[in-house]
Image (tube, grey):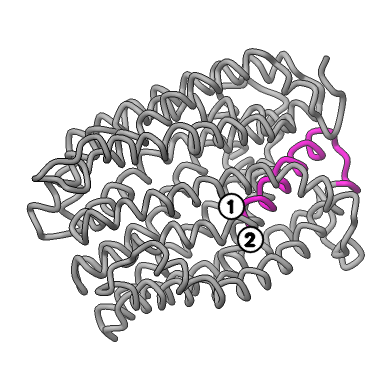
Amino acid sequence: MNSVKQLFQATDMTVGKPWKQIVIFTVPMLIGNIAQQLYSTVDSIVVGKYVGDNALAAVGSAAPILNLLLVLFIGISMGASIMVAQYFGAKEREDLSHTVGTCILLTAGAVLIIMVLSLIVVRPLLHLLDTPESIIDWCASYLLIMFFGCVGSAYYNILSGVLRGLGDAFMALVYLLVATVLNIILDLVFVANFHMGVSGVALATILAQAVSAVLCLLRLARMKDVFDLKPKYLRFHKKYAGSMVRLGLPSGLTQAIFSMAGIIVQSLTNSFGEMFIAANVIVMRVDGFAMLPNFSFGSAMTTYAGQNVGAGAYDRVTKGAKQGTLIAVLTTATITGIILLFGRNLMGIFTNTAELVDLSMRMMCIIALGYVAMAVTQSLSGVMRGAGDTMTPMWISVFTTVVVRVPIAYGVAYFTRSQQDPGGRQESIFISLLCSWLVGATVTVIFYLRGKWKKKALAGTAGS
């Protein structure tokens, strides 16, 4: 009975066995991330099966632009999550309440900015990327609907980040599962029954995400034993907004760099034609599930480190980092093995085209080893972020993306040009991704061991 009750409360990760607390916190988050991945996966399955391979390519081509314009939310979410975890660990209720209130107002401002920007940049970016004319209208309609309905997505991601910072991953999971089921139902209704194509998929997604956002807000309003969500806290405070931006901006910039690199590489991807674009979408959807343990453990380590840094328990942070990273590596290796074993079956869900399944599976085999490397990167980066050092992971991401991934992608494509492949080998996209992941893991371990992240605490006692 007590264990069930604990699922509905904020989790104090400054006590108990580190590995156990990390696993207990990660499991509902992992399930939640699986559910969230189902958003894009179901979208791809529905358009691939009911509309066709070109519609599947359209949704995939829109992804880099969608990710680029959503970086504001990622930054606010990460900054808020770190601050909430540290203030919760330090038992600083007033600061915690002001942080949540400021976070809600910042999100509203970010939503307005995104809506305006989307009108200006969507079409030009699609043309800049040499998006095939056969899918450009579908891409544009999908993106515009997603951006104009981004308020639900923004508030879910940010408020669920606050809940995770408080150690409450369970309720965020419950709300996401509700929204995921709703998204699947609406996908089938809008696309299969009403024949709305990619626009129907986008509409289903924004409606489902709005539901999950409302549920998160209601949950936070009921957590009166932890902090206060009263009108007097729903004000803009420069102190808290500044800290939130300082902590979250590096993560936002990291995602922006990832997205910009994705846009640059997408241009190369588009040059290989609609078949390869569709294959890339399928691989990335399966990739999303392979990455889930990494992102889940990374988020768990951020909360774990944040709470323990806030409490000044640095020995406990180090111990948890070792245990959490080991568990993440073992989990990811297992899931990657399963994907390689049943990959063709998984990819066959998205399309009936055998050639597309073969091409997708060949690309997945190239990047398989990289998932284990990413388990190390995400776990140790999560520790550094939780301690308040968000700059180091950002610079590592900049290096691996700008210096490693993009040059290798274009370099391999250039040097493998032939009469049969005038634009170079398609494998260049995934070889570059694997190289960037392996380099990223190596550099992350080096910077984690240097230990400068211990001096970045916002709340509690700073490490020496």
Q: Residue at x 78, y 36 (%)?
A: 86
CA gap, disc 1 to disc 2? Answer: 8 Å
Q: Position of residue 223 (x, y in %)?
A: 75, 54
Residue 286 image point, x, y percent: 30, 46
In the rendered image, which residue does mark 1 sit on? 171
**Label drawn at residue 196:** none
| Residue 54 in which image quadrant | bottom left
Is 63 covered by the magenta stretch? Answer: no
Magenta highlight on residue 74: yes
In the drawing, what numbered circle is on residue 216?
2
Residue beneath the point at 9% across and 45% down: 420
Q: Earlier in the sequence, mark 1 or mark 2?
A: 1
Q: Nearer the viewer, residue 39 or 364?
A: 364
Of all residues, the one furthest to the bottom in this rendering is: 194
User: What's the magenta region?
Assistant: 73-95
Q: Is residue 298 left or right of residue 312?
A: left
Q: Quadrant of the C terminus?
A: top right
Q: Position of residue 18 (x, y in %)?
A: 62, 21
* Quadrant in which residue 405 is drawn: top left
Is 377 on the left or on the right of 423, as rendered? right
Question: Which tag is nearer the camera, tag 1 or tag 2?
Answer: 2
- Asked if the residue under mark 2 is in contact with the one under mark 1, i.e. CB atoms within 8 Å, the reply is yes
Query: Does residue 332 appear left or right of residue 414 in this picture?
Result: right
Residue type, mark 1 in image: Met
Q: Amino acid at mark 2?
A: Cys
Magenta stretch: dominant SS? Answer: helix
Mark 1 burial class by Cα count in 10 Å: few <14, some 14-19, many 20+: many
